[in-house]
Amino acid sequence: MNLRTLSKPASIDSLSINGERLMQTLNAIGSIGALPNGGVRRLAFGPEDVQARQTLQRWLEAAGMTVTIDTAGNMIGRYPGRFPNAPALATGSHLDTVPNAGIYDGVYGVLAGLEVIRTLHERGIRLDHSVEVIVFADEERTMIGSKAMAGQVNPDPEYYAHPHYAPIQPSLQNIGGNWTQLSQAKRNTDHLAAFVELHVEQGPVLEAAGVSIGLVTGIVGQRRYAITIDGQSSHAGTTPMSMRQDALVAAAQVILAVNQIGCANNGDQVATVGAIKLSPNVANTIPGKVEIMLDMRDLSNEYLDQMLATLEQRMAAIAESTQTRIHLKPQLRNEPTPVNRHIYNTIAQVCDNLNLSASPLPSRASHDAQIIANITDMGMIFVPSEGGVSHAETEYTSPEHCAQGANVLLHTLLQLDQHYRCS
Ligand code: HGY
Ligand code: MN
Ligand code: MN
């Protein structure tokens, strides 16, 4: 039976997900990689990531979906439609986390997608379009999954190399990917009619506005770099202050420069140094080498270019005054990306139909959706994050908001099923 043959149109409008079941799955995945402090660590390609994917695959298959893994390690659950060869409607997000995460970032969007399919499947409802739930590989560091699907992977594996992480090729194999065949993961509008990602806001805006749903207008651009500062290790006691090439003193000045650039001007941009590693890292030796990770974001590429130019000038002066050598290695670049206007309006209309308060906002976090926007129409739905906290164990979104967001996703996909023609 397809949706259209349902007796009364009202039944379509009254379709609703099972909020309790959604929270059960969220807590079950959240227990994989659970930390003593209540947080979660499920690093991409690691054993917890593999275990969470295996669990999800069982759930997807039990909900009437076929599951495939593409060469980039993306897991693609597919719920066949009446026109199985037509481009699919897709949703999804990621299961990998930062080292000390909550249970919502990424996972919520994946499991809300599962819940939407479970709601359709248990009623025997088929849409015209097939519906896919996609788990993108390694969203938190390389975004290799969505970048490969969009045909945007840097062909040089060295680009993804970092001393803190295993090489990308064997990592991909851990989740069923294959670096040598990455180009096969590329998709286009023949495969995907539209992609809608549901995600927790990870910021304070919706909660402060007392609003249930975020109508995402666009996703920030992001530039991430590994900055290496080379000085000279030397004895902390015998080396006169005037003869030192102290890499950590230089790094400290770079970190302060990053913060000043982030705090300057219009206030929409952000700039963070979130990771540092120094050697030899002992009290009685002057640091010879420091590696820091820089993350800059803004809604405007021109502004990101300006921030980088300012930082490069500052780093040249710091290198000079500290007699060190400072090197910048790009690690990730995402373009500022607007959402598809029709999908935005559909989400807004669905919130109206469901009597849910909603307001527009940009996403100041990056998402796979902004990469997939390169190959099909994209939209994003947010639900509030309590206290605006994310990437921390205290990340929280209420079960009510989780259910509301999943219902908005369900009805948005139902509307898009009518909008995008199949035949
Ligand atoms: O960094 C981000 O914005 C995302 O959480 N990966
Ligand atoms: Mn995320
Ligand atoms: Mn994240």
Image: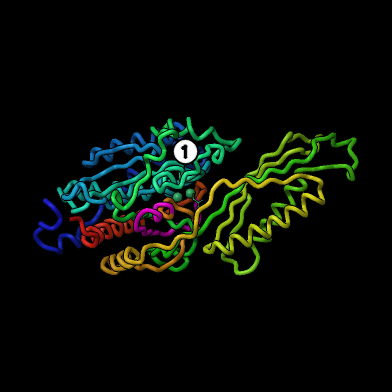
Specify whether residue 280 is in view: yes
Residue assigned mark 1: 44
In the displayed structure image, the side of residue 270 where residue 185 appears, left or right: left
Vertical relation: 402 (above or below) 283: below
Q: Give the extent of the magenta segment.
A: 371-390
Residue 377 on the magenta segment: yes
- Return the residue nearer the eye: 109 or 128: 128
Task: Identify the residue at horizontal 23%, vertical 38% (top origin).
Answer: 62
Identify which residue, 98 or 36, lies in the foreground.
98
Image position, residue 27 (x, y; %): 37, 43
What amino acid does circle 1 point to?
Ala
Residue at image point 73% right, 53% down: 315
Is 410 included in the stretch rendered in magenta?
no
x, y percentage for residue 345? 32, 68
Closer-to-camera residue (265/20): 265
Q: How crowded is mark 1: few (under 14 residues within 10 Å), some or many (20 or more)?
A: many
Ligand 1 within 8 Å, label 1 CB: no
Residue 279 left/right relative to 13: right
Residue name at image x 36 percent, y 59 percent: 379
Which quadrant of the figure has residue 306? bottom right
From the top left corner, tell me how far across and down residue 237 is, in percent: 88, 36
Query: In the image, is 310 to the left or to the right of 416?
Result: right
Residue at the location (18% across, 53% down)?
Answer: 128
Snapshot quadrant of residue 416: bottom left
Indicate left or right for 128 with 397 as reference. Answer: left
* Quadrant where the C terminus is found in the figure: bottom left
